[in-house]
Image (spheres, grey):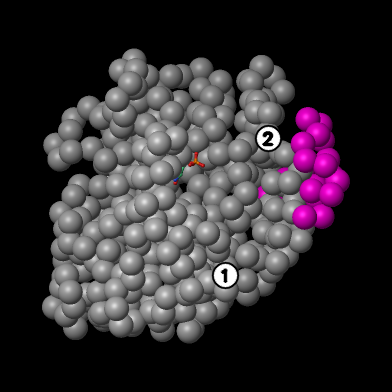
Amino acid sequence: MDSVAELGTTPLSFDQSRRRMAEASRYLAGGVSSNFRLGISPTPLVFERADGAYLIDADGNRLIDYYLGMGPMILGHTPQDVIAAVQDQLGRGILYAGQSAVETEAARLVCEIVPCAERVRFNSSGSEAVQAALRLARAATGRRTIVKFDGHYHGWFDNILWSTAPPPGANAPVAGSKGQLAEAGADVVALPWNDLAALRDRLARGGVAAVIMEAAMCNAGAIQPLPGYLEGVRAACTEAGTILIFDEVITGFRVGPGGAQERFGVTPDLATFAKAIANGFPVAAVAGRAELMELCTQGVVHGGTYNGGSVGMAACVATLSRLRQPGAFTGMEARGTRLMDGIREAFARAGVPAVVTGFPTIFHVAIGLEAPARNWSDLLRMDRARYVRFTTALLERGVRALERGAWFMSTEHDDAVVDRTLEAVNGAVRVI
Ligand code: PMP
């Protein structure tokens, strides 16, 4: 039996996590395997197991989880259908370095569900899928320049980790990491998002192989495209002969089965997916127009030992089979909407200025804004320190939400979970 701490009265303690992080740091650099798990208040947590909407940490705290693995766990932490499919596949072998029926089935599902997907290739991470898309775009156009947008994140590789969090007034792409080659940014242009005139101007100057964007900006904020923006981008790219890439690593299979492109009715040439595509298994995909994707058979190299590995493919098939069912998103969206409204009301009652924006299945809470952000520079006005005080107070009350303001929903976040979350939110808002 776990000694499960109950939500409510005394703040939860995280001493065991602290102790185990100290031990882990003797072997893992910084105690973690991704920088995005560092520096979390009051301490990065160490987990024992997960169950539905909950994580159970080393102190025995049963935490309602809105990280959801940073987005993948859309069916919650222990979906029986996905687990059964994976267990069944494990009995047939792990990695074939060859084709399998389950890989074809996963590809068929992606092509049937995603509007732009005439062909697909699988990878193991979103960062890799983005690399494939950029390479395809450059091969197709014979051009070098990639246009991206301030605050958008497309993985951690040298050629695209630019201006993910630029300081105010930056007028050239800003490197995201020490050790990153300056030359790797020479062909990157970073523009403000939701600004069609800025994009049109740059496209008119020529040489742009691809425009890559999160079709709704979800790494920073959960910002919707302004009415007409995506349509305008689509038309401008077509006119300029530039490949339009939607990076749907977060939005794919999450803001609706067919992702942002289906929700907004704008079809890119290529799109990248990961996270919710296989509910936590390392599966990613690049998908798009057949003649672009078929460049993979005409000199464009796309590789990866683990690509299309049968265990991940089994998870992908089970996940997408569930998400494509009619009504699969209905309950999750209703409860997400209720949670967004409840958070909004809690801040309003406490007199703390905050906006809650985005989608019921991935939304964002920004303290200190008076109106929804339209782009990165608007988000710079958020009160980040106060928000971290808020998520720390939430954690002490048994709710784990990302410090950057994002909240991910799953099918397992039922009404009781939402009620308990709102209790914690109301308590946390009062102490910040
Ligand atoms: N693109 C987007 C939009 C993402 O959100 C992420 C990950 N947060 C990536 C790419 C990179 O994916 P991965 O971490 O799987 O490499």
The yes-or-no answer for disc 1 within 8 Å of ligand 1 is: no
Give the left or right position of residue 277, taking residue 167 as reference: right
Report helix, strand or loop for mark 2: loop
- Residue situated in front as seen by the camera: 377 or 96: 96
| Three-letter amino acid code at the position of disc 1 | Gly
| Residue 327 relative to residue 221: left or right | right
Using residue 426 as the reference point, say whether residue 97 is left or right of it.
right
Q: Is residue 164 magenta?
A: no
Q: Which residues are magenta?
A: 87-112
What residue is shown with label 2? 307
Q: Using the image, tell me which numbered label, if any, was put on residue 426.
A: none
Residue at mark 1: 52
Residue displayed at 41% across by 79% down: 6
Q: Residue at x 53, y 72 (%)?
A: 2
Q: Main secondary structure of the magenta part?
A: helix
Q: Quadrant of residue 104?
A: top right
Q: Quadrant of the N terminus?
A: bottom right
Question: Disc 1 to disc 2, how far (Cα)?
Answer: 28 Å
The amino acid marked with disc number 2 is: Asn
